[in-house]
Amino acid sequence: MKFLHTMIRVKDLDQSIDFFSNILGFVQTRRKDVEAGRFTLVFFATAPGEPEIELTYNWDQEEPYSDGRNFGHLAFSVDNIYDYCEMLMSKGVTILRPPRDGYMAFIRTPDQISIELLQQGEKLPVKEPWASMENKGTW
């Protein structure tokens, strides 16, 4: 398993970019503006190739985020998403968002912190029982 990034939601993107780049000295590694979803993702790291902080800016968010809503999730890559999720289930972990696409799943810690699991490399071929599994709860 490899730690990838932590996501936090931000209310003022320019202020947050200034904080992470000019105050903390992080390097902006990538940016993605998603017109259809009306959000922007900006990734920062202490150095290229290091784990990142993902700033998520929702364009239409008018109210400040409530406590806990601004922190999104931890993210880790795994060698085989299907095998890893199967192992977690055998230990009693609920897969909240199954890896129906062969690429991404979500679980939660006992304290309800979301963890995103991503297939390392290319997506795996879609297969059952994962393809038919429904989401459970929220993540």
Image: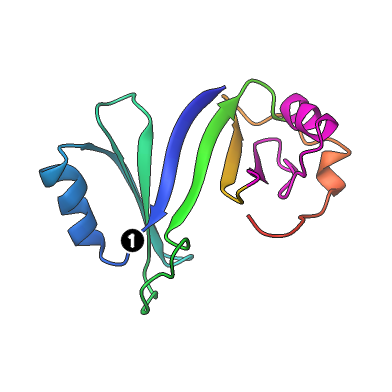
Q: Residue at x 39, y 75 (%)?
A: 60
Q: Nearer the viewer, residue 134 or 70?
A: 70
Image quadrant in which you'd find residue 82? top right
Q: Position of residue 118 (x, y in %)?
A: 59, 34
Which residue is the site of mark 1?
10
Asked if the magenta segment contains residue 98, the reply would be yes
Q: Position of residue 136 (x, y in %)?
A: 77, 56
Coloration of the structure image: rainbow
Report the side of 71 relative to 16 (left or right).
right
Report the side of 4 relative to 62 (left or right).
right
Callout 1 secondary element: loop
Q: Which span is picked out in magenta?
A: 82-110
Residue 131 sits above or below residue 138 on the image: above
For the view shown, which residue lies furthest in the bottom direction?
A: 62
Q: Residue at x 39, y 74 (%)?
A: 61
Q: What is the quadrant of the N terminus in the image?
A: top right
Q: Position of residue 103 (x, y in %)?
A: 65, 36
Q: Nearer the viewer, residue 127 or 15?
A: 15
For the view shown, which residue lies furthest in the front direction?
A: 111
Report the side of 55 relative to 77 (left or right).
left
Q: Residue at x 77, y 24 (%)?
A: 83
Q: Position of residue 102 (x, y in %)?
A: 71, 35
Residue 61 sits above or below residue 88 on the image: below
Image quadrant in which you'd find residue 66? bottom left
Q: What is the quadrant of the C terminus in the image?
A: bottom right
Local crowd at mark 1 within 10 Å, few (<14), some, or many (≥20)?
A: many
Q: Nearer the viewer, residue 128 or 98?
A: 98
Asked if the magenta segment contains residue 102, the reply would be yes
**For the residue marked with disc 1, what is the amino acid?**
Val
